[in-house]
Image: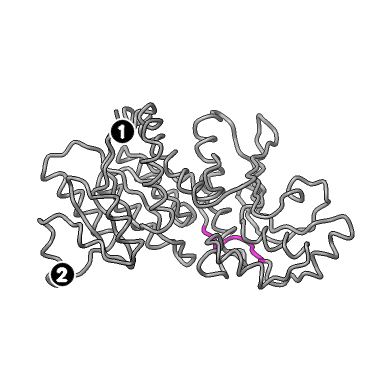
Amino acid sequence: MFSPDLVLVGFGNVGRRFVRLLEERASELRDAHLADWRVVGIATARHGSARDLRGLDVARSLDLVERGQSLEAIEAPEWAGRKRGAPVPSGVQLIEQVAEAAREAGSTRPIVVVETTLLDIGAGQPGVDHVRAGLRAGAHVITANKGPVAFAYAELNSLARTAGRGFLFEGAVMDGIPIFNMVRQTLPAVTINGFSGVVNSTTNFIITAMENGREFAASLAEMQAAGIAEADASLDVDGWDAAAKASALANVLMGARMTPQQVERTGIGHLTGAHVRAAVNLGRRMKLVARGERREGRVVVRVGVEELPADHLFATLGGQQNALLLETDLLGEFAVVQLGGGLTQTAYALVTDLVAIARDYRNLT
């Protein structure tokens, strides 16, 4: 049985939904050899942090954060000196402190860092540092943050292999829809030669809304109010989110070593309702499409608006629907379609990664 100590770096909507899912599905997860998990550390940007190797009170931590209060109230007494003026530890420091304390206490329980901080499109930080710190501290790492995979996958994957630890990130591209784990677990000896997809929910929703008579600003505001759009709307509108996802796909599935800045990119900011409705009148639909292909020995990735025939798979996607088409050597082309996504699905991706580590645990230690 896999009984992990969890260190949560980031405790926003996704992180909180993740721990609630673990509680809601406890009996099913026990059947998957995952049980007796406990949260031993939480680091946040706005609500402080807390550490307790005996296990933090999860219900109280959820309540404190959702009421806008500090997590320091639930920290173990041996770390309480910080309340007298010591600075709040960063995510990296919290990971290192918990791992060191666990070693000193002689704990044999595996540590899993659950990283759910926001995407930084400049360098993938602090997510990259969080993953690196977790692996160097001997922890497994799961993340819903696309930054580490988009900016530093080769380094972090090598570090995980050397350390004999898991590094998984199913929620980075299509919420809980299996892409990376599907390829890793079910497509042995298959080469991915290319991919294409509609991978950003916000832009697809905006384009669909404009087709139906609404305008750009109102559609974007609705997605922000629902918590689907990135806090920085330009990440969606200017195509950066799709570029980060495309980089992650290229790095993991095609062996590229690229970052979002190397993706040829245009967003949807130039589109108006008149543009997209004119395309519909001509039997076509506009979509923001991410594509990757092998060209002259290297992987080339681009993101841009494409005008597609109405019977194209991607043209049939409305609202927040996504799809990813993989081009392979042995299976030809096949697609995975997501008809609905959101907070629960992203949190569930973390659960599937945790279960995957549980299943692989004997081979990783």
The answer to if 265 sits in the magenta stretch is yes
Compare residues 62 and 140 and report the one nearer the observer.
62
From the viewer's perspective, is 330 left or right of 343? Answer: right
Residue located at (64% from left, 62% from top): 264
Amino acid at the residue labelled 1: Ala
Compared to residue 84, the image places residue 51 above or below, namely: above
Compared to residue 220, the image places residue 76 above or below, namely: above
Residue located at (71% from left, 52% from top): 318
Q: Secondary structure at mark 2?
A: loop
Q: Which mark is residue 359?
A: none
Q: For mark 1, what is the residue?
A: 35
Q: Position of residue 65 (x, y in %)?
A: 33, 61
Which of the two labelled residues, at mark 1 and mark 2, occupies the earlier sequence position? Answer: 1
From the viewer's perspective, is 262 left or right of 145? Answer: right
Q: Quadrant of the C terminus?
A: top left
Residue located at (77% from left, 59% from top): 286
Q: Position of residue 288 (x, y in %)?
A: 69, 58
Compared to residue 364, the image places residue 303 above or below, namely: below
Residue located at (19% from left, 54% from top): 97
Distance of label 1 from label 2 (alpha carbons): 35 Å
Question: Which range is magenta?
Answer: 259-267
Q: Position of residue 265 (x, y in %)?
A: 64, 64
Q: Residues within 10 Å of mark 1 (few under 14, many from 20)?
A: some
Q: Which mark is residue 86?
A: 2
Q: Residues within 10 Å of mark 2 (few under 14, many from 20)?
A: few
Amino acid at the residue labelled 2: Ala
| Residue furthest right as drawn | 282
